Amino acid sequence: MLKLKLHWQILIAFILAIILGITIPEHSGYVRWLGDLFLRALKMIIVPLVFASIATGVANIGDAKNLGRIGIKTFSYYISTSLLAIVTGLFLVNMIKPGIGADLGFKMSIPEMTSTTGSISDILMRMIPTNIFQALYNSDMLAIIFFAILIGYFITQVQKNYSDNLLTLFNAIFEVMMKLTSFIIKFAPLGILGIVTGVVADQASDKAKLISMAQHLGVYFVTVLIGLFIHTFISLPLIIKFLGKVNPILHFKAMSLPIITAFSTSSSSATLPLTMEAVENDAGVSNKISSFVVPLGATVNMNGTALYECVAVMFIAQAYGIELTFMQQIIVVVTALLAAIGSAGIPMAGLVMMSIVLSAVNLPLEGVGLILAVDRPLDMCRTVVNVFGDTCGAVVIAKSEGETLKV
Ligand code: ASP
């Protein structure tokens, strides 16, 4: 494999794809299949990855409940800040409307839309499968998530020897899926080459359309960045100032190493050791709190990913010319939260999990192809927000437990 860093490989593939798509659109078939293979590989791992990560996530939450007070506080903090991030994204994407008018010419490829009213009873029906194997077979995400949540919870409710075995099993599956995901992601440059060449070639006959597409993608990119900026520099600082009684500027300074690492690795998990170290040594949070709040946060608390899922899915809907009802937007909010909770702390995990949100509102999974090109830089930025959110959680919880902090 090339030694060049993945984001450089992606950038090169992207530029090459544009050149190929514009200059020899009639030969795009030679590389298109690479994109199809890449998307197939992503789809291949979605079901086991989602199932294993949500089941283990919830099983760990079940354990956390036994930790009582701190557990409940931590989860309330994680869920409310993630929701705040999602709502910020939803507001921006509805205001800026980056995808409206993009007319990407994809409409033909939209698979049969199942007629769904999006009503509560309809969602409930889709959530509870009559046959879980059929749901797995059909990649019926809502049903799979619901079942995974139940399994995760009830793992904690059975005899210890059973629950230990099951937890080990699911954790093992999850670890393997993470490894497999990282392996597939190595092929992202080739996948991007295929997808982008195809997209550009399809549009090459119409230059105006091509430019308009790049513009829309650019506006989408900026929309996510503005959202991440607001959450990192306004929402979270206000929260740590008022709830944690911490000086946000000093906190930023103390967290600079994990922030830089998160940016360059695009991985909350890889950054975790540094995050823990900084939270304990530089922010002064006790080991008791940090060893619980921070690792849990690296897996379940992803403010940046949550915001991004919401903006990306709304952008895809807009680009396909599909207007989502208020109820469907609520589904986007809820499933974006689940997707963020379920995302592993590894590069581009959020992109893989996006299928949950897309399928919940019946958008084609191919929509991911639209945003792939700018995903890596956004991944770097959202990972920073994910990690920073965990550190804010740690100081807020520590303060509420009466600890004295250094910042
Ligand atoms: N890369 C992100 C993280 O590790 C997850 C994502 O892809 O959104 O936090």
Image (cartoon, rainbow, N blue to C red):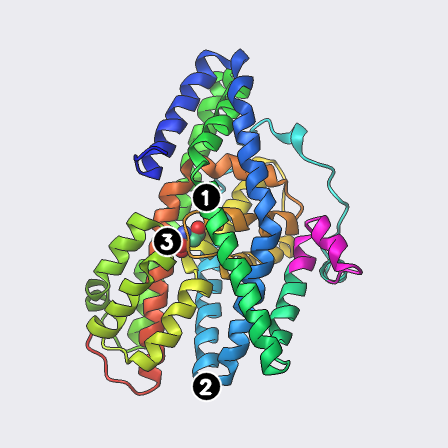
Q: Position of residue 393 (x, y in %)?
A: 36, 71
Q: Quadrant of the C terminus?
A: bottom left
Q: Which mark identifies residue 69? A: 2
> Circles 3 and 2: CB distance less than 8 Å?
no
Quadrant hosting residue 406: bottom left
Q: Is mark 3 within 8 Å of ligand 1?
A: yes
Nearer-N-terminus badge (1/3):
1
Q: Position of residue 38 (x, y in %)?
A: 53, 35
Range covered by the magenta-colored residues: 128-144
Dot in front, 1 or 3 = 1
| Residue at which label 1 appears | 183
Q: Amino acid at mark 2?
A: Arg
User: Looking at this view, is 80 or 405 the one in front?
Assistant: 405
Q: Which mark identifies residue 65? A: none
The residue carrying pointer 1 sits among few (fewer than 14), some (14 to 19) or many (20 or more) residues within 10 Å by Cα, namely few
Residue found 56% across the figure and 54% down from its top: 49
Residue found 27% across the figure and 54% down from its top: 261
Q: Which mark identifies residue 267? A: 3
